[in-house]
Amino acid sequence: MDEKKMVRAVAIDYKAILHGPGRAHEGIAELLRWFDQRDVAWVLLTNDPMDAKSALAAAGLPEPALHLCRDDIPDKAKRGNKAWLEAVADRLGLRMNQLILIGTSQFDWYTGIHAGVVHIHARWASRLGAKITSLMSDEPADVIELLEYFLLHEPRWAFRLDDEDRAFAIRSMLPFNARFPRGGGRTFTIKDIFTYENTVKVGDQDARDVLMLHLLCAAYLDGELPGQSFFCVYPSSTPAKGNPQLAGFLQRAKVMTGSSYKEDLLERVVQAPDTSLERYKRSVGQSTGRDISIAAQARTVRVNPAYKKKIAGKTVIVFDDFTTEGKSLEWARILLSEAGAARVIALTIGKYPSRHTVYQLRAGVTIDPFTTNDIPLTHFQTTTGPGGAEEGPSSVLTTAMEHFAAAAEGAVEPQAAPEAAPARMAHPAPRPVPAGTRSPMTAYKIARQRHLADMLTHLQQHAYPLVWRGEYLVPTGETTTTALWWIALPGQVEQWYDTSEAERLVSGICLAVGIIWEPVAAPGGATQLAEALARMEQRRQG
């Protein structure tokens, strides 16, 4: 058995290879040569017996590592039965998750679904419209791209936990602060997408889709994406509101291994504190004292009662954007296990560096998973799980992002300034700076200034090509310090703004590029900062 955790073979329906007798589809010869260069076996699947070697040679193609027709399948099972791919894996000595299938019909799709194998529909050979929802490739080169950047690397994780006693596994792809290139000298972090809900394009690709596809492919290679599972997303702190950044992708990605996306499987039925916001408030001495322990999850999250007779014996894969200490994931496991799930797998994009905490209900404590449970924290027994965030697949994903950026570079025209951004509080010539003593803004004097500076830096690095610096000014004859914000917009000379002007400018740019941001009200201290952050969070939740 090949122990490598990567795709080792590709099974292909013959109609995706041959356009007719002696005629190969455009790009197929290059794809098969690429397989050979990467030591990836390819398998030809045909319903009827045929002299595959001669048929392929007539088209100038090499022979496959294996050719199977219906006569070679146990009980001569029809296409659509998982026995086809089981036979491929058995003949080549591979696990099922070391295979992918390239098909041309709905029956090929069924074959992949029933076997729990990633299926790609070859649109270059057959266009089935809405009859199937599958990963699609418009040309053979798309298969090369998928394998090269997502399926030919051993899966690596920032954090992993395998707990066979509790039938539970956790995989977190990246450390919370992972940063990647997006082209044009700009970068982005995973928090930009999944926390701040920005849309980030890398070439023609949505960076969110690239990250999510890598997460799913790595889980597949690691054996943590079994076919015909239930997908769900851990709910946000607001009832009836999920995570659109995850849900939108999973609605499409469920087809990778024939799983079902159950958007309402886990329900938040009572408003809960936003744990990220509360942690931030505590870090700045503004804690509200609200409970953000696992007991708060127990009081507000349940398994939807509609699944009482559907979840028994299923593998459930719970997705979340970030995990810190694991309270949400652990409560999801407890709920789903009590509801009858055979196994729970948690997949997250990011992991904050805190150690994972393992939660167990104490002996004699029972819950009803289909309703909320008002149980105190003392009813849980806790132990510290393995900790320490590693790099994860940062280098692999950096290469992928660079590829997508470079692929679109020649076709993309320079980006114009967003129309909604203020063109500039224009002046025919730079405004004269009031006389006085000026000094660099090396340390911010109030939270309002730090908040504005943080967003200017974020825009500069990730979203909008402005240049900025800050100064403090004590005007002549005065003792009060004034902040000067020197900002140069694309194609314009540097101008200075007072704080209110700079905040209006930044608000306009944020509106144009889709970032939720609000300035801090006067007098600009920690209390006003916490209020502004809370308003921003309400807008995100709304």
Image (tube, helix red, strand yellow):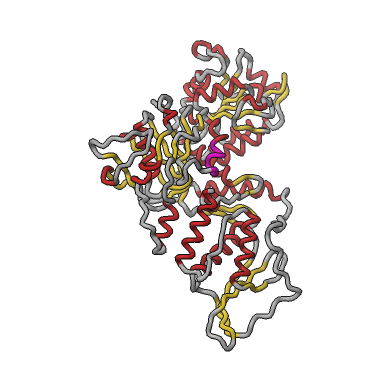
Nearest the viewer among 347 and 409 is 347
Residue 477, image quadrant = bottom right
Asked if 81 appears above or below 441 in the picture, the reply is above
Task: Report x, y in % for residue 486.
Answer: 63, 72
- Residue closest to the far left: 363
Q: 82 above or below 134?
A: above
Residue 376 position in % (x across, y down): 29, 45
Picture coordinates of residue 275 (x, y %)? 42, 51
198, above or below 64, in the image:
below
Report whether 395 appears left or right of 332. Answer: right
Q: Nearer the viewer, residue 12 or 381?
A: 381
Q: Quadrant of residue 147?
A: top right
Is 293 on the left-hand or right-hand side of 414? left
Does the magenta run of residues contain 507? no
Q: Residue at x 55, y 18 (%)?
A: 80
Report whether residue 262 is seen: yes
Residue 173 visible here: no
Q: Quadrant of the N terminus?
A: top left
User: Main structural element of the magenta stretch: helix, strand or loop?
Assistant: helix
> Which residues make up the magenta segment?
244-250
Q: Residue at x 68, y 25 (%)?
A: 126
